[in-house]
Image (tube, rainbow, N blue to C red):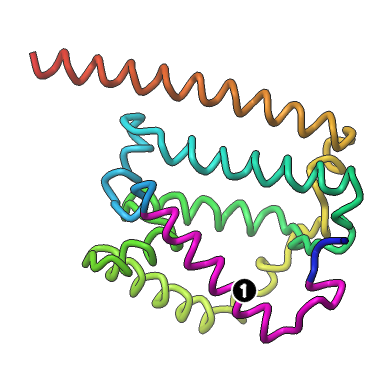
Amino acid sequence: MNLPLFKYGFFNDNVSLIIAVIIGIGFGFALERAGFGNSRILAAQFYFRDMRVFKVMFTAIVTAMLGVFYFAWIGWVDLSLIYITPTYILPQVTGGLILGVGFVIGGYCPGTSLVSMSTGRIDGLMYVVGVFGGVFIFGEMFPLVESFYNSTPMGQITLPQLVNLPYGLLVFLVVLMAIGGFIGAEKVEKYFAAKDMEKVK
């Protein structure tokens, strides 16, 4: 069997949409169970009080990376058929900074705001309204920013191509980085927990 199944015609567009909805519901459920529907938990990440966002998301990234790498290695996945969003470095870095500022201020990213709204939280609902408002404004302003939006194109580039390292070596380095990050996150949490205890005393 080869993956991705959709590219090999195992199901059509309509079925792929149904599968996407099922996966989305499962992902949202997992986010809520991890506490990511609560803006206080999410915002605590930026104050180094609760690093669960870092731990959970990095774990998901590493798990997916290892799965794709080993499935490709044993011949189950054709990496050339996996869609990669083209890179436009300057507009995407700018968009990431705007998203980050919004995340710190509001306590949500677009995905977690939907999770929050689905559980009945008013702040999540207001954030979703803001997201759609921002999308509408961007759509109306797009002709003014189109040249910037399409600037600094790098094509469909991957990290191994960018740094000119073998795929397997880069996967190994990312795993080591994740382990170091998890250890560091634990130490940071303990440090700030101790500082908070001192303030209470």
Q: Is residue 14 magenta?
A: yes
Location of residue 42 (image quadrant): top left
Question: Which residue is tagged 1?
Answer: 19
Q: Is residue 102 visible?
A: no
Give how far across and how far down residue 78 sits, in percent: 89, 57
Expressed as whole percent of the image width and height from the top left, the position of residue 160 reads 84, 40
Q: Is residue 121 above or below residue 73?
A: below
Q: Nearer the viewer, residue 163 or 9?
A: 9
Residue shown at 44%/61% (left/top)?
28
- Residue farthest along the front direction in this orientation: 1
Q: Position of residue 146 (x, y in %)?
A: 66, 74
Name the kind of residue labelled 1 in the image.
Ile
Residue 152, image x and y in percent? Answer: 76, 57
In magenta, the rendered stretch is: 6-32
The quadrant in which the N terminus is found is bottom right
Q: Secondary structure at mark 1?
A: helix
Say whether residue 150 is left or right of residue 1. left
| Relative depth, front residue between 167 and 87 | 167
Q: Quadrant of residue 121?
A: bottom left
Residue drawn at x 37%, y 37% is 46
